[in-house]
Structure formats: structure tokens, C-alpha cells
Amino acid sequence: MNIKVCGITQLKQLQQLDGLGIDFAGLIFVKDSPRYVGDKLNKSEIKNADFDLKTVGVFRNPEMIDVLDAIDEYGLNVVQLHGEETPEMCEDLSEEVEVIKAFSIGDGNVDIDELVADYDAVCDYYLFDTATKDGKSGGTGKQFDWKILSKAKIEKPFFLSGGISIDDIEKIKKFKHPDFLGVDVNSKLEKEPGVKDMGLVLQFKQGFKH
């Protein structure tokens, strides 16, 4: 089971995640996020670090040039698109890096296969997160009903996201889908926005060994 820890703002914490064997680490490039990387990380230090984990740049409705600049400056391995980005943008970016397309799931009946259909050929992974009341994606700290995914074909590796904490380990173990790749964790494993509690991260990871 892959673990993606999102919202990293410190090089030291990236190094610690790498040491713990975490698979993906997310750097948020959305300016109104409390976990926006801004000037908190030294670009060349990230680019030149020898990590086993994959660094993921998280964007919402970005300009193409800004994503390409970030890939180049930070040496990103993966780009996660969290807004209304087009399949064309995903396709263009997938020539540079791996692409995760995120989808926000609300309370209503959602046809997941219809939702992802246009992106099937143009990205590497999907991520399903909880929609906020205003329809924006991510950062809610809440969960959507995972059963919606159980009935869908999907047919691409995907991450579960949204309000996942230590208390959800058994629930995650019981969740079954042939394309379920891993989980994306953020606010529930933090001391404060952008600063992870590494003890909780370790505990979370170890929870899947049994």
C-alpha cells in the first residue's frame, strides 16, 4: 500500500519521510493554501536531493508555464492537478512527468466512470478527494463515502484522500478495489499546517504491516 504525505514545507521533513520509506511527498503550489511552499523550500536542495520517494507538485488551475517551471526548478517527479484542468493539459504534462488527476467527490450520486472518462488516456493516476461546500477540491479534512468507488470500474491506479487519520487504518484495510493504489494523508497527521507529526506518520505506516 502506497502512502502519499501531502503539504510538506520543510526539507528536513522530506528527508525524514524518505527515511521512513514513504512513497510520495506532496509540495503544494496553490497560493491560498496554508501549506503553500512559497519561499519555504530551497529549490536546488530539493532538486539535487537523492530521494527514493517521489516528489509531487500539487496545483489547482495553474498556468502551464508555472507547472513546467516548478518541474524544472524543484525536479518534481509527479504533478497533481486539483482543479478543472483539461485532458489536453494532462496529456502535455504527462510527456514531462507522471500526472495525478484529482477529482472532488460530493454527497450526491456521482458516476465515477463518467467523471474520469476523458482523462483515462492522459494521466497516470487518479486521486479522489472530498469536495468542499463551495465545490473546491481538497483541504476539507473530511471523508466522502468510499462505497461510491467500490462500484466503479476506474481502471487506473488511484489514491484515496480526504480526512484520513490513524483511526482509519482498519477501514482502509477493508476497502477493496483492484485499482486501489494507496492513500493521501495531510492535515490529520500534522502538528500545525505544513509541519507533519513524524511519530504519527510512522505509526500510520506501521499500521499496514499487520
Image: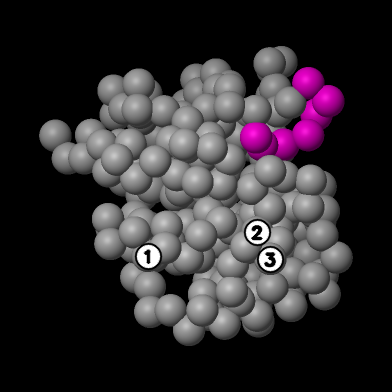
Which quadrant holds residue 103? top right
Residue at figure coordinates x 48%, y 84% from the top left? 48
Check if residue 136 falls in the magenta segment: yes
Work out whether 61 lies above or below 201.
Answer: below
Residue at figure coordinates x 68%, y 43% from the top left? 34
Nearest the camera: 180 or 5?
A: 5
Q: Give the range drawn in magenta.
A: 133-139
Q: Which of marks 1 and 3 is nearer the N terminus?
A: 1
Q: How crowded is mark 3: few (under 14 residues within 10 Å), some or many (20 or more)?
A: few
Q: Name the residue under label 2.
A: 37
Q: Mark 1 points at which residue?
A: 15
Q: In this view, does 123 lie to the left or right of 164?
A: right
Foreground disc of the pair 3, 2: 3
Is residue 135 visible in the rendered structure shown here?
Answer: yes
Foreground disc of the pair 1, 3: 3
Q: Mark 3 points at which residue?
A: 39
Structural distance between the alpha carbons of marks 1 and 2 = 16 Å
Q: Which of marks 1 and 2 is nearer the N terminus?
A: 1
Q: Which amino acid does label 3 sit on?
A: Asp
The x and y percentages for residue 81 are 69, 54
Residue at figure coordinates x 83%, y 25% from the top left? 134
Structural distance between the alpha carbons of marks 3 and 2 = 6 Å
The x and y percentages for residue 20 are 27, 55
